[in-house]
Image (cartoon, rainbow, N blue to C red):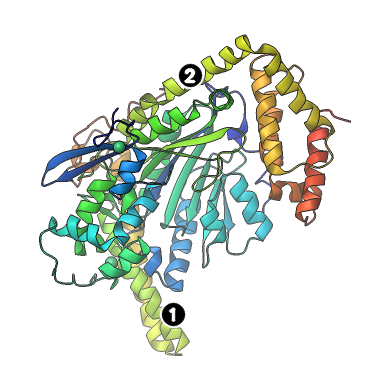
Amino acid sequence: MSNELLGVDGPEWLRSDGADSDVVMSSRVRLARNIAGFPFLSKASDEDRRQVMELVRERVLAGGVAENLLWVDVTEASDEERHLLVERHLISRQHARGSGARGAAISAPDERLSIMVNEEDHLRIQVIRAGLAVADAMTQIDAVDDAIEGQIGYAFNPRFGYLTACPTNVGTGMRVSVMLHLPGLRMTGEIEKVRRAAKSLNLAVRGFYGEGSEASGDLFQISNQTTLGKTERRIVRDFESAILPRVLEYERKSRHALLTKSRMKIVDRSHRALGVLRSARLMTAEEALKLISRVRMGVLLGVVEGVDLSTLNRLILLTQPAHLQRAVKANLNQAERRVVRADLCRDRLGGE
Amino acid sequence: MQCDQCDNEATVHEVTVVGGKRVEKHLCESCAREQGLTVQPNEPINALLSKFIMAPGLVQQAVTGGKSKGEPQAPACPECSMTWMEFRKSGVLGCAKCYEAFESRLAPLIERAQEGATHHVGKAPRGSAGLADHQRTLRTLRAELAEAIASEQYEHAAQIRDSISDIEAQVEQQRADAARRVDRGLVGPDDPEGVTPGGAGEDPDAFDEFGGAS
Ligand SMILES: [Zn+2]
Ligand SMILES: [Zn+2]
């Protein structure tokens, strides 16, 4: 895989200088599109899949859709490379595990834009940005979508809009999501209220790695479910105003309430976490995420000094299995990964 | 909010549209379970829908309004040969034409998954209808070409190759024309005809108020 991709600095969405980045890690907009004249993937022959790949490679990469798009042939990629892409949220697990001709176009080096080819739909276009930037992400993806549409005709119907393999995605084909860091609400136990409120507003709440994944390290993903009957702008506006301002406010209030009521407990908790990260010799991914989350909260509340947010954000990614393997350039079993993960945490956080 | 059936807090909320009327249900976990409405927390809508599709009684109800049981089998999609049963098992459709072939059965499912919405009102492709036709033809020709080469019918293959390059030239022309129209401002966000072949322009400023909004 090209060296331009997957740089060690990590994707741009891990930066810590986005809007409201104390709570919102990243914002993402995704569009599902199918190419007119080809059957959807459940009925596509090998030849169809190949033709779709060719068409996209030829028209999208050469067509001025975005600067510096790199092509990854997911079929040819190694297991480790596919996992790296999943950990960086550039392709889905489903795409990594899939079979048959499939690929992805990724913008380098920022990794803001990625276009999965032959996933559940012919095209899954995604833009990810750091912090709360749903509207910006949507402006960008709209331009990309227009540029692709100038090159390739989409499957569209006046009643149902953009036609998708799964009928739950029809209409705009657009999903909007944010990744939230909610240690305060988790500690006060109010996270369940957020879940319920989100559910009643027809929003989905998931873990760090999307569908089916547990929320770990106090990271939660909230996304819209409704894709039909609203304009794209309305979807974004509703999404941004429905629940986010309150979640942000409650999270900040909980953090400060915790600090006021039980200052020493919070100070102890974050320093204890930092202590373990700086000295442990064995570390599971789960534990790393949990500890990083605690330190992050301490840094944001000003009770931990000398650790910067971008280091912590990057650690979240770098402690994932495929990233560890790449760092040491070797295949690792689970036990070995725990050693390497602990080494990495000590190294990045100035432990001994 | 209180449960419709008892004094507990309602945690399961469902809105359905029956005969054009909105029906709301607010139930606690246990009453919801009794009514077969309960869902896993955070269950993604796809999983919900596929459950719904899998439950034959519900589909019947959605399709027939719960009246008749002996509904005739819908014919398969003429384009990809997907059957309704196949869709019910997999939860994914076979091609764009499936939406027309199964429109009356899909509509209530989609409405239910989409908070009662029935029609698209967002952006629409502009000026690519012709591209779609060419793509369809090219797809068929390329498949024929592969077959001709495999069966060593080289003369036939050469003919197909010629047709392919003719169509490709047309496509090229069309894309260039489309680009020129956009450059000259003939097609753009301000031109309702250009933007909305599907009559979807109810929100004319749908896409252009974003600059620096966040
Ligand atoms: Zn009840
Ligand atoms: Zn079909």
Q: Nearer the viewer, residue A223 or A172?
A: A223
Residue A240 against residue B184 in the figure, above or below: above
Secondary structure type for disc 1: helix
Residue A327 against residue A101 in the figure, above or below: above
Which residue ends up furthest to the top in the rendered image?
Answer: A260
Residue A296 against residue B57 in the figure, above or below: above
Q: Which residue is mark 2?
A: A250
Disc 2 versus disc 1: nearer the observer: 2
Q: Is residue A206 left or right of residue B181?
A: right
| Residue A268 placement: quadrant | top right
Question: Please, which chain is the residue tagged with disc 2 on?
Answer: A
Which residue ends up furthest to the right in the rendered image?
Answer: A352
Q: Nearer the viewer, residue B133 or A224?
A: A224
Q: Nearer the viewer, residue B30 or B48?
A: B30
User: Quarter holding the C terminus of chain A?
Assistant: top right
Residue at (58%, 32%) from the top-left corner?
Answer: A218
Q: In the image, residue B21 lies at what x, y percent?
A: 12, 41
Q: Which residue is mark 1?
A: B146
Residue at (41%, 57%) from the top-left corner?
Answer: A121
Q: In the image, residue A190 lies at what x, y percent?
A: 49, 25
